[in-house]
Amino acid sequence: MSFESLGLMPELLRAVREQGYETPTPIQAQAIPTVLEGRDLMGRAQTGTGKTAGFTLPMLQRLAHHANTSASPARHPIRALILTPTRELAMQVEESVRTYGRHIPLRSTTIFGGVNINPQTKALRAGVEILVATPGRLLDHQQQGNLNFSQLEIVVLDEADRMLDMGFIRDIRKIIALLPTQRQTLLFSATFTDEIKQLAGAFLKNPALVEVTPRNTAAELVRQIVHPVDRERKRALLAHLIQSRGLEQVLVFTRTKHGANRLSEQLDKDGISSMAIHGNKSQPQRIKALEEFKKGSVRVLVATDIAARGLDIDQLPHVVNYELPQVPEDYIHRIGRTGRAGSEGEATSLVCVDEHKLLRDIEKLLRKDLPKQVVTGYAPDPSIPAQPIETGRQGGRSSGRPGGRPGGGAPPSHRARPGARGK
Ligand code: AMP
């Protein structure tokens, strides 16, 4: 199986070659010909499967016939809209659009909240064919009269399950209502829950169904280990592991924003450069943290589950669960950050007595026991009793559970939605 055999045009094949991709991933092999045909598509795939190229490459090809280098905004109407749950994912998807589309004169931009709206308005006025957006800010632009979707041909709902989790359903409905009914609709989701199926039923026409690898396959490629340790000694153990093993580029997960901040500050004090990424950080701070981490100038990135969703960091060598997630599926999302594209990855979990139930739930989901290894000098004290787990103000709510909307009540309006505060 080759990219050539999927029917991609030379400009795209060249870009793919320049990326060093040799063979299409399973989702690409299935999605590319289907999208090229113009069919609607419902894809079950999560980050790390190559889904972004799976929809971006054929989308670019379908838009290529009107690509032009005219300076006139009128020659660059919005022809494709990609909706994503988070700013980070929006940025990464647009980066992919630029990368794969570099030999085709199509323009793209991102639209997301938390930053000044004016530069976005300017970009929109200049004309862009491909818009990558989070739902709330998109509606803000709509209200300001900055958007015209009359020429729209393709809409992509990326990480649709996550958008529902974050309470974006109303925004999505509003946005879809703005689009021409004659269009191609693609929906990607890590899970096909009833809610997702309903959404697909409402917005997709006779979609082709594409499913890749069950969600815990990633888990099999990653070396996983559990270090039992006392609650109070986790930080010392983490610092010890990083220092003694000379670990670089470590992604560390905590359950709460507060915990992420605190840990990051403490690691800095231990002489381990670190940054935290979560929803209370300003957008420039988050972008900076991610860039510094990717460059290797920050050794540890401490993240909460929601903040880490959609982060595209290639072949990350180490993921550490400083605290186990409340939702077992999040464990799989977390460790999916490592061992990508066949490279060796390692996921280490520091587990204290409070988390034994969470660990059992994860092992049940994985259908296997994780190896446990006490690190010399850090053996847990068996006399310490378990305590209830600190989950932060939002109850440690996380991914993977439909209907887990923060606040519980009516879906928030797009001005007061959870995503507006970041995640
Ligand atoms: P995604 O699931 O879209 O987030 O992609 C996961 C990672 O796989 C990205 O870093 C891509 O650059 C990479 N990737 C996508 N397609 C391929 C391919 N065919 N061969 C190798 N790597 C790929």
Image (cartoon, rainbow, N blue to C red):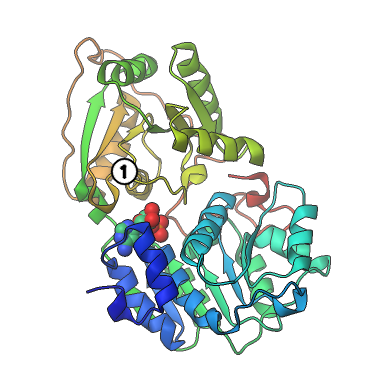
Cβ of mark 1 under 8 Å from ligand 1: the answer is: no
Find numbered disc 1 in the image and state the secondary structure of the residue it sits on. Answer: loop
The percent coordinates of residue 117 (x first, y second) are 77, 53
**Relative depth, front residue between 82 and 17:** 17
Q: Is residue 62 left or right of residue 242?
A: right
Q: Quadrant of residue 349?
A: top left
**Relative depth, front residue between 226 and 94:** 94
181 versus 22 height, above or below: below
Counting other residues with Cα less than 10 Å from the Cα at mark 1, is it few (<14), some (14-19), or many (20 or more)?
A: many
The percent coordinates of residue 227 (x first, y second) are 24, 25
Give the amino acid type for the residue marked by disc 1 in the picture: Thr
Q: Quadrant of the N terminus?
A: bottom left
Residue in view at x 33 percent, y 31 percent:
355
Please count the marks in the image.
1
The percent coordinates of residue 358 (x first, y second) are 32, 38
Q: Which residue is mark 1?
A: 338
**Relative depth, front residue between 416 and 212:** 212
Residue in view at x 52 percent, y 56 percent:
95
Q: Is residue 79 left or right of residue 271?
A: right
Q: Quadrant of the C terminus?
A: top right
**Relative depth, front residue between 283 and 361:** 283
Q: Is residue 341 left or right of residue 131?
A: left
The percent coordinates of residue 213 (x first, y second) are 26, 64
Asked if residue 165 can be seen in this view, the reply is no
Please identify the residue farthest to the right as the structure is shown.
144
Asked if residue 28 can be seen in this view, the reply is yes
Residue in view at x 44 percent, y 49 percent:
312
Q: Quadrant of residue 32?
A: bottom left
397 versus 158 height, above or below: above
Tell me which image quadrant ligand 1 sits in.
bottom left
Residue in view at x 44 percent, y 55 percent:
401
